Amino acid sequence: MKEMNIEKRILKGLAIDGVIDVEAKTELDYRRESGGMRAVGPVIISGHCRVENEVRSFSETLELDVLAPRIKLSNSEPFTIEVLKVKGVADDGILLMLDLGIHGIEDNKTETLPPALDELAEKPVPVQAEPTVQAVDETAPAADEAEADFESIEDLFDDADNVYTSCCLVVAKADDTYETIAGRYQVDVNELRNVNKNKGIEPKMLIMLP
C-alpha cells in the first residue's frame, strides 16, 4: 500500500477556537483504461468547529484523479483508495490533514518486453500515469485547468530512484514561490524545486514537499 498525505487550510482569517470533529469520505469512480486503472471523484471532508463560543459546520471537497499504471497493478489486490486518517486543527483557520491509502500497487513489479521492443524501452517517453490530486474550494475546475494542475505532480509510480511510497502535498497560495513555500515549511528550496521538476507555481496548485 502507498500512502498519500494532503494538507489543506480552510477558513483562513477566521478565529477558530477549536475543531470539534472531522470526517472524510470518498465518492470515487473506478474505471479501466488502456494505460491502467483510474480513480476519479471527490473526497468530501466535513466537521464542526467552535468560533467565538458558537458551533459551526464546515465542508471541503478535494477532487482526485489518480491513474495507476497497468504495469504497477497488483495481481492479488484490486486498485482502491481509502481514507486512512483525517485530522483538523485550529491554525490560521483550520488546517486539514488527510492520509489516503492506495491499494493494489506493486513498486517492484516489472514488465518483460519482447526483444523487438527493447530499443524502444530504453528511450524516454512521457509519463502519462501518475497519481494527481487537486484541491478545490467550492466547485471543480474546468477540464483544461484541471489537466494543467495535474501535470504539477509527476512520477509518483515511476521506477526511478525518487519513487515515493508516501508524499506530503500542500496547496500553493497566491504569489507563492519556491522560496516562500520552502521557508513556510522549513524545507530546502533546491530539493523542493527538484521534486516538483521546477515547474511554475500557480495559485491552488498542489506542491510536493521533499
Image (cartoon, rainbow, N blue to C red):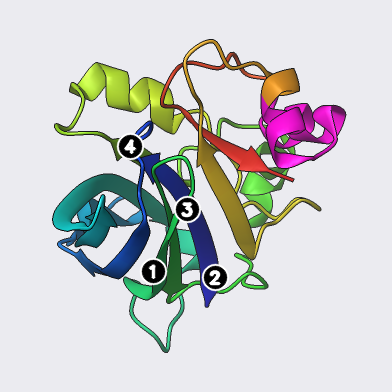
Tag 3: amino acid: Ile
Comparing 185 with 21, the one in front is 21
Work out whether mark 4 precedes mark 1 in sequence or the reverse, and give the earlier one: 4
- Marks 3 and 1, how far apart at CA: 10 Å
Q: Position of residue 80 (x, y in %)?
A: 32, 73
Numbered label attached to residue 141: none
Between tags 2 and 4, which lies in front?
4
Alpha-carbon neighbours of circle 1 within 10 Å: few (<14), some, or many (≥20)? some
Give the labeled residue for mark 1: 86
Numbered label attached to residue 2: 2
Tag 1: amino acid: Val
Q: Which range is magenta?
A: 181-197
Give the labeled residue for mark 4: 14
Between tags 2 and 3, which lies in front?
3
Work out whether mark 1 precedes mark 2 in sequence or the reverse, and give the earlier one: 2
Tell me the residue at 56%/30% (across/down). 126
- Marks 2 and 3, how far apart at CA: 13 Å
Give the labeled residue for mark 3: 6
- Marks 4 and 1, how far apart at CA: 21 Å
Q: Is residue 26 left or right of residue 203?
A: left
